[in-house]
Image: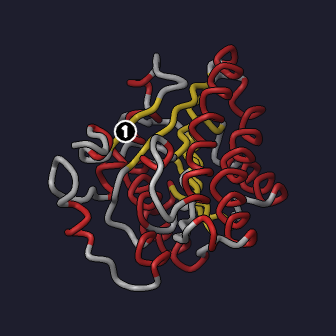
Amino acid sequence: MRLAGKVAIITGAARGQGAAAARRFVAEGARVLLADVADEAGQALADELGPAAVYQHLDVASEDDWVDAVRAAGDLGRVQVLVNNAGVLHFSELADTSLVDYERVIRVNQIGTFLGMREVVPAMSDGGGSVINVSSVEGLGGMPLMVAYAASKFAIRGMTKVAAMELGKHGIRVNSVHPGAVDTQMIPDAVGAPVPMEQIGKRVALGRVGQPEEIAELVLFLASDESSYCTGAEFVADGGATATHSLA
């Protein structure tokens, strides 16, 4: 049981990468607060996972919601793991990106991560913990049509390093995870139509897109004591997408 006795908060836990991480965490002995705005799906997952999982409505851009979520997680025990996984994606060229759409992405992806980290510091300071911030390969390099998303994911990468430097004295480790193309509903939802993911997968070294369960294994490692000397680092799971450059 790699997470035996640990209490974790996972945002965006109702589906996709968050749900996959929740399943792995429970299987490895953790008690998990599943946080999302998709109440029906989130509660259904909590029911599926049993008494080790509790669902909590959380708009990650809301300070009040974060206070409630951390308090609810505290009912399970001392919070030792936070997975800032919630995120939204928006496609548009820079010249066509409205301020409303830009701010929506920043509020969820960037501000949500900031608030989550800030809110768990008191809970983790007495005994340490692990914060896993889900960034993206778009936090390592740019991509057309993704100015808001890339801005938010680069910000997560930077905030992770600052937090790691500040919180190490409390035994709190902070790392970022950078997935490539993963087979979830995020891209189809952003596009508003089905997306041929197999074609995207052919562009990377491994010749396929990733699965949520593969990202969950990396998140599990960072949540566990196996990563006890890892902080301020970037962990990439992208099938080889960032192994190349534009002249390849």
Mark 1, secondary structure of its residue: strand
Q: Nearer the viewer, residue 180 or 31?
A: 180
* Residue 51: x %, y % from top left: 51, 59
Residue depicted at x 52% and y 48%: 31
Q: As shown in the figure, which amino acid type bears the numbered disc 1? A: Val
Q: Residue at x 49, y 75 (%)?
A: 190
Residue 162 or residue 100, whichever sits in front: 100
Residue at point 42% right, 52% down? 21
Please determine whether, in this image, residue 96 is positioned above or below residue 49. Answer: below
Is 114 displayed left or right of 31 in the figure? right
Residue lying at 44% horizontally and 25% vertically, measured from the top left: 225
The C terminus is located in which quarter? top left
- The reply, left or right, for residue 131 in relation to residue 66 is left
Locate residue 144 relative to residue 97 in the image: left or right: left
Q: Nearer the viewer, residue 203 or 177?
A: 203
Query: Looking at the picture, does residue 156 appear above or below residue 173?
Result: below
Other residues around mark 1 within 10 Å, as few (<14) / some (14–19) / many (≥20):
many
Where residue 28 sits in the image (x, y, percent)? 37, 43
The image shows residue 162, relative to residue 99, as above or below, that is: above
Q: Quadrant of residue 22?
A: bottom left
Residue 60 x %, y % = 70, 59
Report which residue position mark 1 lands on: 236
Measured as percent of width and height from the top left, residue 232 is found at 54, 25
Farthest bottom residue?
193
Q: Quadrant of the N terminus?
A: top left
Front-most of 45 and 20? 20
